[in-house]
Image (cartoon, grey):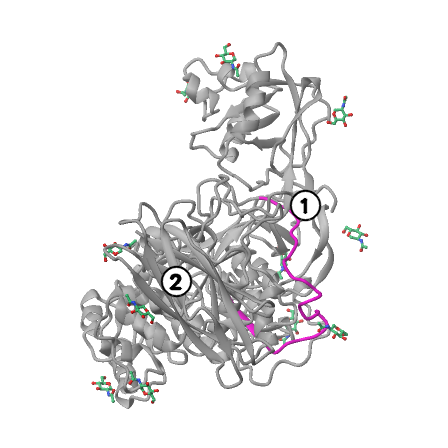
Amino acid sequence: MQGNTLLLHIFTLFLLLGATSSSAKDGINDRINSKQVYIVYMGAADSTNASLRNDHAQLLNAVLRRNDKALVRNYKHGFSGFAARLSKEEANSIAQKPGVVSVFPDPVLKLHTTRSWDFLKYQTHVKIDANPKTLSNSSSSSDVVLGILDTGIWPEAASFSDDGMGPVPSRWKGTCMKSHDFNSSNCNRKLIGARFYSDPNGDEGDSTPRDSIGHGTHVASTAVGAAVTNVSYYGLAAGSAKGGSPESRLAVYRVCSNFGCSGSAILAAFDDAINDGVDVLSLSLGASPGFQPDLTTDPIAIGAFHAVERGIVVACSAGNSGPSSYTVVNDAPWILTVAASTIDRDFQSNVVLGGNKTIKGRAINFSPLSNSAQYSLVFGETSKASNASLAEASQCQPDSLDGNKVKGKIVLCDGRNDEYSTSEIIDTVKAVGGIGLVHITDEYGAIASYYGDFPVTVTSSKDGATILQYINSSNPVATILPTTTVVDYKPAPLVPDFSSRGPSTLSSNILKPDIAAPGVNILAAWTENSSDDDVPKGRKPSLYNIISGTSMACPHVSGLASSLKTRNPTWSASAIKSAIMTSAIQSDNMKTPITTDSGSVATPYDYGAGEMTTSESLQPGLVYETNTIDYLNFLCYIGLDITKVKVISRTVPDNFSCPKDSSSDLISNINYPSIAVNFTGKATVNVSRTVTNVGEEDETVYSPVVEAPSGVKVTLTPNKLQFTKSSKKLSYQVIFSPTLTSLKEDLFGSITWSNGKYMVRSPFVLTK
Ligand SMILES: *[C@@H]1O[C@H](CO)[C@@H](O)[C@H](O)[C@H]1NC(C)=O
Ligand SMILES: *[C@@H]1O[C@H](CO)[C@@H](O)[C@H](O)[C@H]1NC(C)=O
Ligand SMILES: *[C@@H]1O[C@H](CO)[C@@H](O)[C@H](O)[C@H]1NC(C)=O
Ligand SMILES: *[C@@H]1O[C@H](CO)[C@@H](O)[C@H](O)[C@H]1NC(C)=O
Ligand SMILES: *[C@@H]1O[C@H](CO)[C@@H](O)[C@H](O)[C@H]1NC(C)=O
Ligand SMILES: *[C@@H]1O[C@H](CO)[C@@H](O)[C@H](O)[C@H]1NC(C)=O
Ligand SMILES: *[C@@H]1O[C@H](CO)[C@@H](O)[C@H](O)[C@H]1NC(C)=O
Ligand SMILES: *[C@@H]1O[C@H](CO)[C@@H](O)[C@H](O)[C@H]1NC(C)=O
Ligand SMILES: *[C@@H]1O[C@H](CO)[C@@H](O)[C@H](O)[C@H]1NC(C)=O
Ligand SMILES: *[C@@H]1O[C@H](CO)[C@@H](O)[C@H](O)[C@H]1NC(C)=O
Ligand SMILES: *[C@@H]1O[C@H](CO)[C@@H](O)[C@H](O)[C@H]1NC(C)=O
């Protein structure tokens, strides 16, 4: 397979929420029934209130009596409700019925790359972030089950071998659904469950758990794939691949296909997964920032709430809409929200100029050019078509180049500030006979994109300046070298531009994202029969693929969560989340603070608590446990009334009521592993936290180290936490008092408790 190439399409799965009808799918529905699918959400499934349980049955019967084809899905395990074809009037009327929390149109869902740019196409070899010394080895097996909601699975991939695994846990209630190309023999002791949720009126080809896209297979093998040696992407960057928790079991819920992921299917998968008995759920999909629904109409927030209430850890990707602020999605406080970071591996395709001067370029290509600079190099600007402007030609915009000046030459295009992707420019250059492309742009940052066998490389504007200067010499020449893998690349990790950023739009009192994990150039298993038509002529699709996105970061964290659950079966979902967050690191492999792609020091809005670690999180020392009451209070603070709160939760105590002072400021007091405070109009803010000792020693004393931003005084009371056999839980107060009258900008800092052995760090943000 040496030398083979494969053009990769990377998908980040996005729910396009808020849009109305008009997809092809709705077109079909429209013909069958002019009514739209609505989701009727009715809160907890097993409420102790018999009258609430009745409400579900009665409403459902009423809908079925009117039209027995109206029902699309019924939710009854993890929570209560249904999806049905209803008229607007019917939907409005149902919304008024007792026991109904919300009624909302089934979101129109789309699979798409997050930008028009093809920045999500590449290959590299990735060091899957699992330390064999600290994590159990693949020959052992755990009864922890990771569920993945995605595009399905390619079960034949070596990553899903069950070699050495013990029998399927007896408590497992999941199933391996049969379809035209999938049956129970595709499941094994590793892949223990596979379900699909095709639209009853949709494409027959989607009625299978089999992954025809690759995304779901990639994510699954990253999280829990067995160790597979000697894998590579067409010989580049060969090595072995292993998931974060190779001992864990896998259950897949196919909720996405080429047209996207429907909200009603996502809810059905949550409903099943809760009942099947998963321990951790991983979702590499979400809403687009502008279309984020509120908590009672967001299928992921709803499903995750019920999963977390039953002790399931739910990790979700933060989105690929960075680097602007307020772009993070999946930011409910019960979700573990994952940003992306780079790893210490780079893919360089350098440019050699006459005189053997080498300029750094970043790309993945299998350039057939000679290694010596023997090809004429021309600038787009000086090769302009007569009717094009200099600016258009310098950026090599479509139809702006004169073929006579470009044919047989390598073309230099200055892409700074333009809106065309490298792929679009390749089309332009190829169309007029160019033989290679050097694209100057900072758009891709740390990402090496994949360009097949056309010689293409991307240089930063800084490095590109040298080429722009050189091209003024007489008879400029160049070549583009084929890609080499650079290991121990520094600095790493850094936060790539695409990773979505905080603050959270949901509340300025919860810090999001929570954590960062590798999401750039990740090598993992792929679908053999990819529907991708980019496989070059004469080449077989690769069994492994290298792709990027917060989609790839999420399974690193869900895999780690599965490992923690294996080690600590009794830990709550929030203890696992806390362990992952408080053990994160903030410095890179140059021992300097982690930066963003643009070079600025990363803040918690970029990476939450920091980059995840695999060994420290196994022994966190202390954990911040966030309980259901915290989440119920959150619902109160964001404005839900007590009747709705009581319907939503199955464990709401009889004596629970929304706090009298339901100020959103109280959200800061939710026992979260990080702290966010809104300082507007306040002189001092008190925040309280409770930590639980999970270390080996019962008797131990923790002292704090505070990193405070200048202009703010941070006081802790008490400033020693003395744990004993009888006091495993201790609380403390943080008093923030700015010494300035008003904050000019959001400020960041941290509080680290340590007993000399463990460091338990919480980042904080003070917003103006
Ligand atoms: C049970 O739910 C109904 C609404 O369907 C509500 O009126 C009633 O107060 C609830 N009973 C209890 C004990 O919470
Ligand atoms: C790895 O496997 C070996 C033998 O199968 C076993 O002795 C060892 O304890 C395992 N290591 C871990 C960390 O589970
Ligand atoms: C599953 O499908 C395979 C291949 O199509 C077939 O050989 C096998 O007999 C089937 N197994 C069952 C249990 O249906
Ligand atoms: C690794 O894979 C390559 C290509 O598939 C093959 O040529 C080579 O023999 C393999 N090496 C080992 C040690 O299995
Ligand atoms: C060009 O430079 C590289 C190192 O940058 C060197 O290995 C190579 O031999 C040089 N080639 C020529 C023709 O000087
Ligand atoms: C220039 O003219 C060609 C042929 O007439 C046309 O295809 C192209 O779009 C024009 N380009 C610009 C930049 O207007
Ligand atoms: C190259 O030459 C052009 C004019 O011939 C000039 O405008 C430009 O600034 C020069 N570029 C560099 C980098 O020297
Ligand atoms: C902080 O609180 C003030 C007043 O309550 C509010 O107007 C402002 O929007 C809040 N800031 C953020 C970032 O939410
Ligand atoms: C993959 O595609 C090939 C060729 O189209 C087909 O023969 C084969 O059955 C497919 N495999 C699966 C598992 O769908
Ligand atoms: C509710 O009752 C529980 C015991 O059933 C008690 O621990 C808790 O403090 C009570 N909460 C309130 C707000 O009264
Ligand atoms: C903050 O908490 C401390 C310790 O509990 C308390 O003494 C103080 O009065 C509180 N301050 C405010 C402003 O609430």
User: In the rendered structure, which amino acid carries the disc numbered 2?
Assistant: Thr
The image quarter containing residue 659 is bottom left
Residue denoted by label 2: 715
Q: Main secondary structure of the magenta part?
A: loop
Any part of residue 181 in sight: no
Q: Which residues are magenta?
A: 122-148
Say left or right for 414 vs 356.
left
Say left or right for 138 vs 319.
right
Front residue (pair 553, 65): 553
The image quarter containing residue 400 is top left
Quick check: 375 above or below 256? Answer: above
Counting residues from the start of the chain, the first of labels 1 and 2 encountered is: 1
Helix, strand or loop at mark 2: strand
> What residue lies at 71% left-to-right and 61% top-to-bottom?
228
Front residue (pair 70, 193): 193
Q: Residues within 10 Å of mark 1 (few under 14, many from 20)?
A: few
Any part of residue 542 in sight: yes
Quick check: 342 above or below 574? Answer: above
Task: Give me the disc on residue 488.
Answer: 1
